[in-house]
Amino acid sequence: MIKNFVKHFLGSIRCHLNGIECSRGGVYIGKNVRVVNGKNVTLGKNVSIRPDCDLFAGTKMFIGDYCDLGTRNRFTGNIIIENSVLIGPDNYIASVDHCYEDISKPVMNQGVYSPHNNGHQELRIGEGSWIGTHVSIVGDVHIGKHCVIAANTVVTRDVPDYCVVAGVPARMIKKYNIETKEWEKLK
């Protein structure tokens, strides 16, 4: 009980020091979490951000209630993570990508842009979803609710509700059938 109190107390201090809005309590922010544009970050209640994560907020970054973000994740741009999302370790989740058009400049000096391949203004991960490990989600992707993104998957297109996706690029391998109440493999 004391350990949880200390974790949450330190979490509120880390929120305050980084300008993050987290007034609903129960927030844990691990060691070596790096935050850029903290004033644009809002955390729900009982959020855990494990050690060594990077939060590079665009104009808005929202992490909903009861989310758990694993170690060594990088979040960049305009991102909305809905309630009860579990994100494993070592992922790259970004609503932006590097510019590379000007061959007279190194890519690292060209800045970033927001690819709008899906017609959204932000990257969104739906309620109750689970993102495995070593996943890359790039662009204005919307992942539906209660989805599973398998380990080592690259997602650049929207994923509908109640789906399991895997691969490079991501493809649906299962979908939940609401009528039969079963997960069905897709061909």
Image (cartoon, helix red, strand yellow):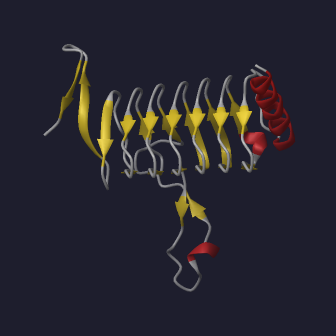
Which residue occupies the foreground of this view, 156 or 136?
136
Q: Position of residue 106 (x, y in %)?
A: 58, 80
Q: Position of residue 55 (x, y in %)?
A: 67, 48
Q: Residue at x 55, y 24 (%)?
A: 83
* Quadrant assignment for the N terminus: top right
Q: Residue at x 61, y 73 (%)?
A: 108
Which residue occupies the foreground of this view, 101 or 124?
124
Q: Quadrant of residue 10?
A: top right
Q: Position of residue 123 (x, y in %)?
A: 51, 42
- Residue, far front: 2
Q: Residue at x 47, y 46 (%)?
A: 140
Q: Quadrant of residue 66?
A: top right
Q: Position of residue 81 (x, y in %)?
A: 55, 34
In this picture, residue 33 sits left or right of residue 155: right
In this picture, residue 161 sits left or right of residue 53: left
* Quadrant assignment for the C terminus: top left
